[in-house]
Image: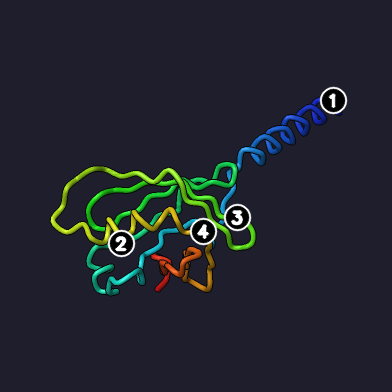
């Protein structure tokens, strides 16, 4: 009986160990949907009308998050890596290729997004910025 119980607990422990190692990394304060509320010369109303957002809810693998963005026309995708000390690296930016009537916001966003090198999270706000004074401010979509 003792051997059966030992074997049972060994299998149970091994199963728990395997499940724990398979749990993906997750940063709930960062990995959420973010609505763009301040960027360049665009008004907040224009950003809201275009449903401008980035989505960082994808799984984190090796410290990198596969993200998505929308600025009113095309679906965009990218890889982001948020590092210690408020550093961020955005790479692999791409998008669908629909031609829409007004693509000013999307064009401006695409030109500056992968040049953002710093980030900060304050409350429900995410701010991305570069070394030239450009910034993008987002509010968490799940914040009331």
Q: Secondary structure at mark 2?
A: loop
Report the residue at 53% width, 73% height from top.
122
Residue assigned mark 2? 52
Crowding at mark 2 (Cα within 10 Å: few <14, some 14-19, many 20+): many
Residue assigned mark 1? 3
Of callouts 4 and 3, the N-terminal one:
3
Report the residue at 84% width, 25% height from top.
3
Q: Secondary structure at mark 3?
A: strand
Q: Residue furthest front?
A: 132
Q: Nearer the viewer, residue 86 or 52?
A: 86
What is the CA distance from the residue labelled 2 to the residue labelled 1? 61 Å
Q: Secondary structure at mark 1?
A: helix
> Which of the image's four quarters has the N terminus?
top right
Residue assigned mark 3? 83
What is the CA distance from the residue labelled 4 to the residue labelled 3? 10 Å
Front: mark 1 or 3: 3
Front: mark 1 or 4: 4
On screen, residue 60 versus residue 98, left or right, reads right
Q: Nearer the viewer, residue 78 or 122?
A: 78
Asked if 117 appears above or below 41 in the picture, the reply is above
Crowding at mark 4 (Cα within 10 Å: few <14, some 14-19, many 20+): some
């Amino acid at each position: 009986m003792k051997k059966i119980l030992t074997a049972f607990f060994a299998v149970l422990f091994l199963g728990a160990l395997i499940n724990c190692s398979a749990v993906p990394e997750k940063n709930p304060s960062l990995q959420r949907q973010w609505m763009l509320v301040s960027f360049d010369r665009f008004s907040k109303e224009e950003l809201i009308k275009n449903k401008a957002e980035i989505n960082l809810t994808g799984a984190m693998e090796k410290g990198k998050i596969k993200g998505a963005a929308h600025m009113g026309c095309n679906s965009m995708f990218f890889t982001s890596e948020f590092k210690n000390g408020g550093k961020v690296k955005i790479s692999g930016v791409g998008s669908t290729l629909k031609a829409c009537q007004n693509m000013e916001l999307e064009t401006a966003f695409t030109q500056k997004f992968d040049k953002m090198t710093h980030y900060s999270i304050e409350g429900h706000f995410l701010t991305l910025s570069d070394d030239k004074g450009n910034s993008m401010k987002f509010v968490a979509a799940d914040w009331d």
